[in-house]
Image: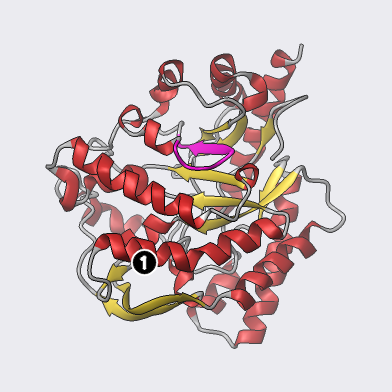
Amino acid sequence: MKRSQHRILTTHTGSLPRPADLLAMMAANADRRTLADRVRSAVAETVRQQVDAGIDIVSDGEMSKPSFVHYVTGRIRGFEGINTDPLGLDLDEGFHGYMAWRRPLMTGGNPFESRPECIAPLAWQGDATLRTDIDNLRAALRGLAVEEAFIPCASVSVVAQRLANAYYPSHEAYVQGIAEAMRPEYREIAASGFLVQVDAPEMCMDRNLPEFRDKPMADYRKRLMLWVDALNYALTDVPEEQVRFHVCWGNFEGPHVHDVPLRDIVDIVLRVKAAAYSVEASNPRHAHEWKVWREVRLPDGKVLIPGVIDSVTNFVEHPELVADRILTYAAIVGRERVIAGTDCGFGTAAVMGSVYPPIVWAKLRALSEGAALASKTLWA
């Protein structure tokens, strides 16, 4: 994994806006070959747009995936049922009626209103679709100058938390079954030469589930430890240097008044066998948490990827603000160990989007411009 040795490198969290015609084809269940051809060209388009915006470490934008987690149902056998029970996340957070007010403003539906359900033993079956994703990204990179490329993957625990279990006798057994099933995905991405980004929003946001909302923090931390141990097991065959670990408090605009503080869980996040940790750092509820890194030592040799632009508003951050945020983190952990990133993805599900696509690219340009400003100061 590259470090910011001569300048601040830039990246993002993975998902990017899908072209309108691709969304329409997904919604209409277009025939497999037609859809595959459009996904391949969409990956090429989004990689070029990332390069044009000045992004150094790029992804495929998750063009092929219906969402950052639901895609696994096509790669793991056993998710053959549907669970209609509500997930239980209180997005109103005491501001009753907020989501009902906001729903008409959203561009799509809620992908978690009906959840795939595990009703049989889980087993990997995704060689072909994963190979296609790898081949599409490799083809898109030909002739372009980038530092590195990564492919996002669902964490073991976000699968366990978002896809219901009706087969395994316990949560622990379910998590272990997912870990076994996800091992080939992590391993094959790394073997291809790309970085593996593991997306784990549940590490932060699931403190707000009914299961933990009114329980002691110790109970929640115990569950986090279970999840991290299972993920580390699933990453057994993956070099640590090829892993990025992303956590956030949910890619939605809302009150966030009940978010778990980063300070309460950061030590467990850092137990994940990864070379870099991508952490939401720009939204108004967590922008102050740069101070945590003055108290908690980033392990030697590891990289921090703070989100220096947000992913849920249509404000385009000023490059000087972006530079200020980068400089703050560089002063704490060292310039070589900071890569400038985004709070979360801009297209976490095909049916959802908060930021107008042309503004996404303006925000990413502001990210790269801010990184250039910070680099002038840091390497003066």
Question: Residue 144 location in percent, x, y?
Answer: 83, 51
> Which amino acid type is shown beneath numbered disc 1?
Pro
Q: Would you say residue 201 is visible in this rendering?
A: no
Please name the residue that numbered disc 1 is placed on: 111
Q: Would you say residue 183 is visible in this rendering?
A: yes
- Residue range highlighted in magenta: 271-280
- Which residue ends up furthest to the top in the rendered image? 380
- Residue at position x 52%, y 37% from top? 277
Question: Residue 345 location in percent, x, y?
Answer: 51, 50
Question: Residue 182 location in percent, x, y?
Answer: 49, 64
- Residue at position x 58%, y 31% from top? 302
- Residue at position x 46%, y 56% from top? 353
Res 176 quadrant in image: bottom left
Res 216 quadrant in image: top left
Q: How many marks on residues?
A: 1
- Which residue ends up furthest to the right in the rendered image? 143
Q: Residues within 10 Å of mark 1 (few under 14, many from 20)?
A: some
Q: Secondary structure at mark 1?
A: loop
Q: Is residue 233 left or right of residue 357?
A: left
Quadrant that contains the C terminus: top right
**Is residue 304 part of the magenta span, yes or no?**
no
